[in-house]
Image: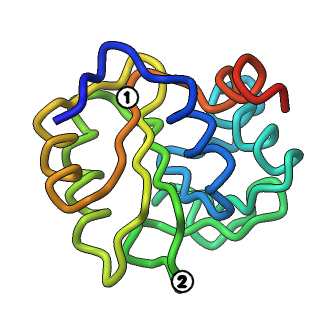
Amino acid sequence: MPSHDAYDPALIRRVLTETKHIALVGASANPARPSHHVMAFLLGRGYRVTPINPGLTGRTLLGQPVRARLADLTEPVDMVEIFRSSDAAGGVVDEALALPWLPRFIWMQVGVRDDAAAARAEAKGVVVVMDRCPKIEAWTIIKM
């Protein structure tokens, strides 16, 4: 199992350049929330982002239709990004691993870490990044 205390910039670059479609779990309609900022940034950089939030189901967020849960996705995603607490992250990872197709990457936002969930995902060949923000990493590593 790889260390999740530090990441090789080449790995972060690979994840961010190979990802095209992201399911953002914990997306918020509140423009003051970090998940809203990150989603807007990712959309602005050409990523396709599907927001996941059961409280916003049936609405659109930044022009994208909101899904209640990962199981409601109608097509594969490359990355599942988790904007939930560490306590909730394991359940989200398990939902991602139960999809009919595995995402290539699972990304847990700054402050979110679940080593046991990461191990379950990695055992299935999914690359996991924890306690990092793709917006910050895109600025610092790949200069997006």
Residue 72 in the image: state x and y as whole percent: 44, 78
- Residue found 43% across the figure and 61% down from its top: 104
Question: Circle 2 sits in a helix, a strand or a loop, which is it?
Answer: loop
The reply, left or right, for residue 106 in relation to residue 122 is right
Left or right: 17 as drawn, with respect to 88: right
For disc 1, the neighbor class at 10 Å (few under 14, some 14 to 19, many from 20) is: many
Q: Quadrant of the C terminus?
A: top right
Quickly name the residue at label 1.
Answer: 130
| Residue at image location 41% in from the left, 65% down from the top | 103
Q: Amino acid at mark 2?
A: Glu
Query: Quadrant of residue 31 in the image?
Result: top right
Where is residue 28 shown, x and y percent of the image? Answer: 62, 41
The residue nearer to you, when weighing 68 against 6, is 6
Above or below residue 97? Residue 143 is above
| Mark 2 neighbour density, 10 Å: few (under 14) some (14–19) many (20 or more) | few
121 to 98, vertically: above or below? above
**99 and 20: which is toward the camera:** 20
Question: Quick one: SS at disc 1?
Answer: loop
Q: Amino acid at mark 1?
A: Met
On the image, the x and y values in percent for residue 69 come to 41, 66
Residue that carries the numbered disc 2 in the rendered image: 75
Which residue is nearer to you in this view: 2 or 116? 2
Count all numbered tags in the image, as a single digit: 2
Q: Is residue 60 left or right of residue 83?
A: right
* Vertical order, 37 against 43 (above or below): above
Query: Is residue 112 found left or right of 114 in the rendered image?
Result: right
Nearer-N-terminus badge (1/2): 2
What residue is at 62 percent from the left and 56 percent from the top? 19
- Which label is found at residue 140? none
- Residue at mark 1 to residue at mark 2: CA–CA distance: 24 Å
> In x, y percent, where is residue 79?
50, 56
